[in-house]
Image (spheres, helix red, strand yellow):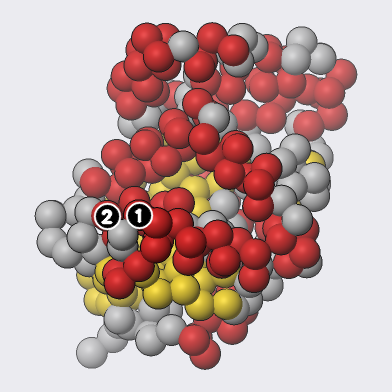
C-alpha cells in the first residue's frame, strides 16, 4: 500500500529518533495526545498503531495503561519499538507485528479496537480512500480513528516565510509530490478537506479537525526552540491554537479524529 520500500525506513531509525527528540518532534507527540484526549473518557483502551514505526507513540499510550498493537513493515523500526517498550517497562502491554498495511486484515482482529492511530501514513500512499477503509476495519463499533498527515496548505507558507524562497513557494502550489528531509523520499501532499471527503464517503463521521505546529515551523530560529522557557511558551501557544480556526488550516500537520462507520443491522 505504501509507495516506499521498507529499507528507506530501516536506514533512518537513528535520524528519526533524533527528529522525535527535537522540539518540533516533541510538539508533534504532545499535541497529538492532547487532541485525542478530548475524545476519550478515561477507559483503558485497545489501541492499534498502524505504521507505528519505532514505537514512541505506542509506548506513551502503554505507559498510560492502554493495550497497544503496533504494526509496521520496517524490521529495524520494530526492533527499536521492542527495545523501547522493554526499557520503559511496558513490554507486556505492547504487541509488535511486522506487516504491510495492505495486509492488515490478515494480522489483526477486525472490529476489536477502540482507537486506531493512522499517523504519518497517508503521505506515503497513493489511494487515500482504500487505505482509510483498511485501517478502519479493525475498529469496534463506536471506535475512533486518529489521522495525522503533513498539510499541503502549509507548504507555500513554510517556503515563503521560513526560507524566504518565493520561487519554491510558488512551485509548491500545485506540486504532485514533495520530499521529506528525514527519510529523503517523495510523499504525496494531502489536505484535511481531501481526507474528510474520503472519510465521509466511507461512512465515517469527522468529530474533530486540529492543527499541529501552527507556528513552530514558521519560526526560523530553531536553536531558540531548545531553550526550556521559550519551548514552554511555544507549547502553550500551540495547544491554544490547535482547535482555533483558521490556524488548523495552515498548521504544518493536520489532525483529524473520526468515528467508525455505523454498520447496518
Residue under the point 52% across and 35% down: 21
Which picture quadrant has residue 156?
top right
* Image marks 1 and 2: residues in contact by CB distance under 8 Å: yes
Count of numbered marks: 2
Identify the image quadrant of the N terminus: bottom right
Percent coordinates x, y for residue 139 in the rendering? 34, 74
Q: CA distance from mark 1 to mark 2?
A: 8 Å
Residue that badge 2 annotates: 63
Which picture quadrant has residue 125?
bottom right
The residue lying toward the viewer, choosing from 44 and 256, is 44
Q: Residues within 10 Å of mark 1 (few under 14, many from 20)?
A: few
Vertical comparison of 231 with 131: above or below: above
Residue that badge 1 annotates: 88
75 sits to left or right of 29: right
Residue under the point 30% across and 69% down: 93
Query: Regarding mark 2 in the picture, which secondary structure is present there?
Result: helix
Percent coordinates x, y for residue 92 in the rendering? 30, 72
Vertical comparison of 219 with 88: above or below: above
Confirm whether residue 130 shows in the render.
Answer: no
Query: Regarding mark 1 in the picture, which secondary structure is present there?
Result: helix
Which picture quadrant has residue 26?
top left
The residue lying toward the viewer, choosing from 218 and 230, is 230
Residue under the point 33% across and 82% down: 111
Amino acid at each position: 500500500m505504501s509507495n516506499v520500500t521498507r529499507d528507506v525506513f530501516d536506514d533512518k531509525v537513528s535520524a528519526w529518533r533524533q527528529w522525535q527528540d527535537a522540539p518540533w518532534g516533541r510538539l508533534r507527540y504532545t499535541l497529538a495526545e492532547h487532541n485525542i484526549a478530548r475524545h476519550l473518557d478515561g477507559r483503558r483502551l485497545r489501541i492499534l498503531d498502524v505504521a507505528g514505526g519505532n514505537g514512541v507513540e505506542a509506548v506513551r499510550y502503554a505507559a498510560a495503561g492502554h493495550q497497544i498493537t503496533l504494526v509496521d513493515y520496517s524490521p529495524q523500526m520494530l526492533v527499536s519499538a521492542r527495545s523501547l517498550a522493554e526499557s520503559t517497562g511496558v513490554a507486556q502491554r505492547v504487541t509488535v507485528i511486522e506487516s504491510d498495511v495492505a495486509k492488515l486484515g490478515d494480522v489483526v482482529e477486525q472490529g476489536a479496537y477502540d482507537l486506531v492511530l493512522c499517523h504519518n501514513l497517508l503521505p506515503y500512499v497513493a489511494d487515500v480512500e482504500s487505505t482509510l477503509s483498511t485501517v478502519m476495519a479493525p475498529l469496534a463499533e463506536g471506535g475512533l480513528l486518529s489521522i495525522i498527515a503533513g498539510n499541503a496548505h502549509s507548504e507555500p507558507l513554510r517556503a515563503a516565510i521560513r526560507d524566504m524562497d518565493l520561487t519554491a513557494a510558488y512551485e509548491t502550489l500545485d506540486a504532485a509530490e514533495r520530499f521529506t528531509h528525514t527519510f529523503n523520499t517523495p510523499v504525496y501532499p494531502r489536505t484535511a478537506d481531501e481526507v474528510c471527503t474520503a472519510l465521509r464517503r466511507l461512512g465515517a463521521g469527522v468529530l474533530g479537525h486540529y492543527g499541529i505546529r501552527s507556528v513552530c515551523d514558521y519560526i526560523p530560529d530553531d536553536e531558540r526552540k531548545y531553550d526550556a522557557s521559550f519551548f514552554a511558551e511555544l507549547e502553550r501557544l500551540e495547544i491554544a491554537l490547535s482547535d482555533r480556526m483558521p490556524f488548523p488550516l495552515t498548521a504544518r500537520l493536520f489532525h483529524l479524529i473520526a468515528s467508525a462507520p455505523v454498520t447496518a443491522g
